Amino acid sequence: MKNAARLAYDRKRSSRPTARKKTSTATVLVKSALGTADHRSLTRRYRSRADHWTFLFAQITGYSFAVLVLTGVFLTFYFDPSMARVTYDGPYGPLQDVPVSRAYDSTMELSFEVRGGLLMRQIHHWAALIFCASIALQLLRLFFTGGFRRPRLLNWLIWVGLFTLGMVASLTGTILPDDMLSGGSLLLIKGVLESIPFVGTHLQRFVFGGDFPGDVIIERVYWLHILILPLIIAGALAHRRRLVTRQHGHTRFAPGSAAHRLGSHHVTRARAAIVGAPKAAAIAMFLFTCGVLALLGAFVQINAIWQFGPYEPGAITAGAVPGWYMAFLDGAVRIMPGWELDVAGNPLTLAVLVPAIVVPGVFFTALALWPAAEAVITGDRAEHHVLDRPRDRPARTGFGAAGMTFYGLLWLAAANDQIALNFHLDLFAVTSFFRVAIFAGPVIAFVITNRVCHYLTRRERHEAAHGRETGRIVMDAQGRFSEIHARPDRPQAAIDSPDHELATTAKE
Ligand code: HEM
């Protein structure tokens, strides 16, 4: 009787749909070793939740975008994108009776007369800066850990696209209030358009609707800013989310790396908190992002347009600079020599064309094509679901450091006047330094980073073979001294093995 019951139980258990569908880890490993593993089952198997703090960057991008939309809708009720001239008669004394555009006037109204208006403006502006920063950090994370490899190529392209879209959205936003900073950005756009060979002047007239600055540009930029760009960004974020939740899941770090540093119980607890209550964790993170943005908006002043004044063609601001994401372009323009060529009677202004179009064009194209280039050079077209440690890919990490140095130097060059002023240096000497550093810096960064990565992996191999030095010296019975060597936490064989990814993930 007992046996019959047991038999019935076993039969029922084995006929459960989940039991039949489930592929064991061993089966996946054997299939993959034989090359018969179907990619979908592998992808399903390694699909995991975000359980590392660096995965927060993507979440912060989504949440700051939500804050941008919410505060943006509020601003839209009061902002008037018109360039019609009016006389300022609001509460800000120094601008009394000054002729300004309606766009400037309504932004002043938002700042001084609408309840909570200034707070909303500041939160909106801070959210834009954080939005771009979180995308940049996410790109760095994906790059240095190889999170862009198959099957996540599209995901990588979406992030590169989001970075450029974020830059354009922020630039169009700062143009809207029609203050001096906004005029400076418009002047830059005009110069860049005009530097495009042959069609430049026509393009500039087309964009501005006639002479610069004209009276339609703010309204055109407005629709781009509040409707077209947010829709494209929302579509890109939604598609990226769909890819992560429905198709390839999150990548994960190999066990041992985070656990090694934090202590495994911390990692397990954090993982349990996020995996066990993903909705609560997401809501908490959203509220936390809102809280930080509200604090920044309330206490850290940004874009004080009453201090810059309304835009006047021919004038330029001193000491006021655009958002951080545009600084690398500003730096490139500042250090480029004033070269101009004559092509068939047409001036070719390299001084603007190269820094404002060629440099960012090449930089972002290289970034977008990196995964394809790496796959061709290394011949590695396999799917990867476990992230690399930067040190395990010295060449890629070296190129990443070179790219960061290039970007960082252009960024610093945007402050060449401030550097010269504060360090009592000659402005031309500072500019010349950047002209040399922009070529030498990335090479030096590549060499140093590459060597550091090789050193770290060599040290790990050494520790795997001989154990880690503990600093504890003991004396044996013969009076000889020797140091106790501890066993390394991660077995080297697993690190070196080509099946490292499968093996480490399967262990989890
Ligand atoms: C990724 C999305 C967005 C970014 C990066 C962004 C960025 C910005 C920035 C930097 C400003 C200048 C703020 C200032 O004056 O200090 C601005 C202004 C503005 N934004 Fe956005 N924004 C975004 C989305 C939106 C959306 C969805 C709306 C409306 C539905 C909106 C409406 C406005 C309005 C009306 C202004 C002018 C008012 C003002 O300057 O204070 N924005 N935006």
Image (spheres, rainbow, N blue to C red):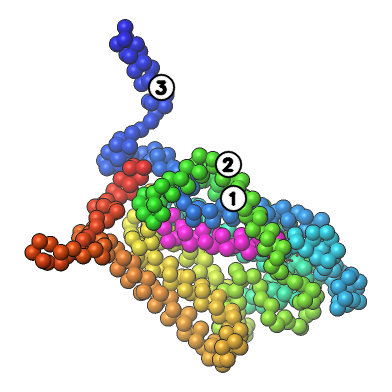
Res 412 quadrant in image: bottom right
Q: Residue at x 69, y 73 (%)?
A: 185
- 3D distance between C-alphas at marks 1 and 3: 38 Å
Q: Secondary structure at mark 1?
A: helix
Residue 133 is situated, as x and y percent measured from the top left of the image, at 57, 63
The quadrant of the image that shows the C terminus is top left
Residue found 27% across the figure and 38% down from its top: 30
Give the left or right position of residue 439, taking residue 450 as reference. right
Residue 177 versus residue 41 in the image, above or below: below
User: Circle 1 is placed at which residue position?
Assistant: 285
- Please identify, in this view, whether the residue under mark 1 or under mark 3 is nearer the observer: 1
Residue 149 location (% of width, % of height): 42, 54
Q: Is residue 124 magenta?
A: yes
Circle number at residue 279? 2
In the displayed structure, does residue 204 sit left or right of residue 273? right
- Residue at 61% in and 46% down: 283
Residues under labels 2 and 3: Cα distance?
29 Å
The three-letter amino acid code for the residue at tag 3 is: Arg
> Which numbered tag is attached to residue 16?
3
Where does the magenta region start and end? Answer: 123-147
Dot 2 or dot 3: first in sequence order is 3
On screen, residue 207 above or below 487: below
- On screen, residue 73 above or below 429: above
Tell me which corner region of the image, top left, top right, bottom left or bottom right, holds residue 158. bottom right
Secondary structure of the residue carrying tag 2 is helix
Image quarter for residue 24?
top left
| Residue at mark 2 to residue at mark 1: CA–CA distance | 10 Å
- Quadrant of ligand 1: it is bottom right
Badge 1 or badge 3: first in the primary sequence: 3
Q: Residues within 10 Å of mark 3 (few under 14, many from 20)?
A: few
From the viewer's perspective, is the residue at label 2 or at label 3 nearer?
2
The residue lying at 34 percent from left, 11 percent from top is: 5
